[in-house]
Image (cartoon, grey):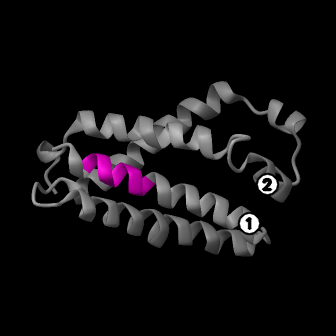
Amino acid sequence: MDPSKINWLAVVVATIAFFALGALWYSPVLFVKTWMKELNITKEDTKKASMAKILPLTLILTFIMVTNLAFFISDPKITVGQGALYGFLTGFGWVGLAMILTSLYELKGWRYMFINAGYMAVGFTLSGVILAAWK
């Protein structure tokens, strides 16, 4: 796990891809209506949120997550298929299941849990593919 072996441009591109996936995932095209219903919030409630704070922080945290994944995928012997697998195992096996576990105690519904865990699984898988393909 040598930081000098990480392709930092690939990390930036994977971060942007993960972030863009989130914009699509939590949009009317995919899951925002169900997600908001599960949280019992309205569009008016979301307008109270400070997106000027949330979006940059989301981008920074996503960069850190993708950087962590890059440490595991920086070995040049790792194939794109392995990168996808490692991304999925990280996104679902660690992050997604941790989110579900926490959500159980918060008494959240299964749809809410799978929307959020699914986003992490797909986002990390996408990042794993980008990081493994671009060495």
Residue 114 belongs to magenta span: no
Q: Which quadrant of the rendered structure holds the C terminus?
A: top left
Q: Give how far apart the Cα atoms at labels 1 and 2 are.
A: 8 Å
The outermost residue toward the top is 52
Position of residue 84 relative to residue 67, above or below, is below
User: Is residue 48 at least partly visible in the picture?
Assistant: no
Q: Is residue 31 left or right of residue 61?
A: right
Task: Name the residue: 78% across, 68% down.
Answer: 108
| Secondary structure mainly formed by the magenta segment | helix
Q: Amino acid at mark 2?
A: Thr
The residue where tag 2 is placed is 34
The residue where tag 1 is placed is 111
Query: Which numbered tag is attached to residue 12?
Result: none
Under tag 1, what secondary structure?
helix
The image shows residue 12 at horizontal and vertical percentages of 33, 34
Task: Name the residue: 65% across, 24% down.
Answer: 52
Q: Is residue 114 left or right of residue 39?
A: left
Q: Earlier in the sequence, mark 1 or mark 2?
A: 2
Position of residue 94 relative to residue 19, above or below, is below
Position of residue 99 relative to residue 65, above or below, is below
Under tag 2, what secondary structure?
helix
Q: Are marks 1 and 2 in contact (CB under 8 Å)?
A: yes
The image shows residue 25 at horizontal and vertical percentages of 62, 46
The image shows residue 97 at horizontal and vertical percentages of 55, 72
Task: Name the residue: 73% across, 74% down.
Answer: 105
- Give the residues drawn in magenta, as a range: 124-131
Q: Which quadrant of the rendered structure holds the N terminus?
A: bottom left
Residue 37 location, quadrant: bottom right
Q: Is residue 108 left or right of residue 5?
A: right
Residue 104 location, quadrant: bottom right
